[in-house]
Amino acid sequence: MKIIVGSRGSQLALTQTKLIVNELSKLNPNVDFEIKVIKTKGDKIQDIPLDKMNDKGIFVKEIEEQLISYEIDMAVHSMKDMPTKMDERLVFPVIPKREDSRDALILKNNLKLEDLSMLETMIIGTGSKRRSYQFKASYPKAEFEPIRGNIDTRINKLHTQNLDGIILAASGLKRISRENEISHYFDEKTMIPAPCQGILALQTRTNDYQVIAVLSKVEDRCSRIQYIAERAYLEEIEGGCHAPVGAYCEINGDKITIYAVYGDEQGNKLIRDNITGATDNADELGRTLAKKMKLALEESYEKR
């Protein structure tokens, strides 16, 4: 049996795909895997900040089209890049073990986090409103510069441009073995990450039971619960446009707590809240929290 795996061509995307393929190969020695690189719209357009682009599927559309047309058999994406609405012919049948969900700060000139409060000004590289608004809540002097490109490009910009630091997903840095450059890991409750950050999306055709059976061996229960809770929150909040949205599900035995942040596009309002309940109710809890926070944001404007 041969399985053609679709992937973006960036260093991180290919590293992630190879990690999954290597794991699947060990568990399925009779299956031959081939990686096919597919260029997406997001790869082609590098001069526009992500929050200025309206296409939610900017890193996935072309790959999904090849899945639907049987040119590939499965795809590996970053789950946080996936739109909340998906073609019913496609599915995420398996959720593999999550990598580190936290955001990470890389600082220039051997600075430490505690040094930042002593700076008169600071410029942090990030194109994410979720990251910049949360960071500014702790460091009001901070200014932000949107940066695009792969991880190597962003780290290079830190050292060649007028930046004091950059914020990136810890999972990506770890996957390409650059975690030694991290100055600080943000706690998930302080800097709430993007929903499903650190989770890989293994995508197949809904009716391709042979491929699904091969993938089933990497299913991880805890990561599945987190995926359900955080994805439900995102679907209900529908903040996929340009609003800052973060959600993180913490598992404690048979209970979960979902921590979330939600705000307006301008960063004038940023609401934090959490909800606790049974793991079996992960979807319902995520949606309940999203509805509550949407209402709270609306009411905050009515009181002005």
Image (tube, helix red, strand yellow):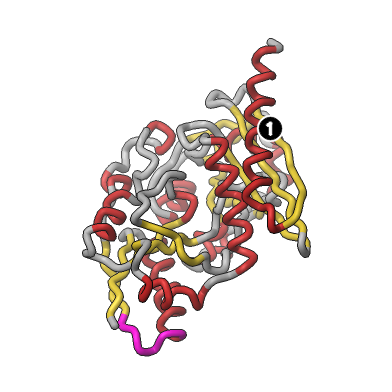
Residue 227, horizontal then vertical, whole percent: 57, 56
In the picture provided, is 25 more to the left or to the right than 224? left
Q: Nearer the viewer, residue 267 or 285?
A: 285
Q: Is 274 one of the magenta-colored residues?
A: no
Amino acid at dot 1? Lys
Q: Residue at x 54, y 65 (%)?
A: 174
Magenta span: 27-32
User: Does 43 sit above or below residue 217?
Assistant: above
In the picture, which quadrant includes the C terminus? top right
Query: For the view shown, which residue lies furthest in the bottom direction?
Result: 30
Residue 265, horizontal then vertical, whole percent: 53, 26
Query: For the view shown, which residue lies furthest in the top direction?
Result: 304
In the picture provided, is 121 more to the left or to the right than 31? right
Q: Residues within 10 Å of mark 1 (few under 14, many from 20)?
A: few
In the picture provided, is 125 more to the left or to the right than 292? left
Residue 185, horizontal then vertical, whole percent: 66, 54
* SS state under label 1: helix
User: Does 99 sit above or below residue 43?
Assistant: below
In the picture provided, is 244 more to the left or to the right than 285? left
Reading the image, the residue beneath label 1 is 292
Q: Nearer the viewer, residue 208 or 100?
A: 208
Task: Name the chief secondary structure element in magenta.
Answer: loop
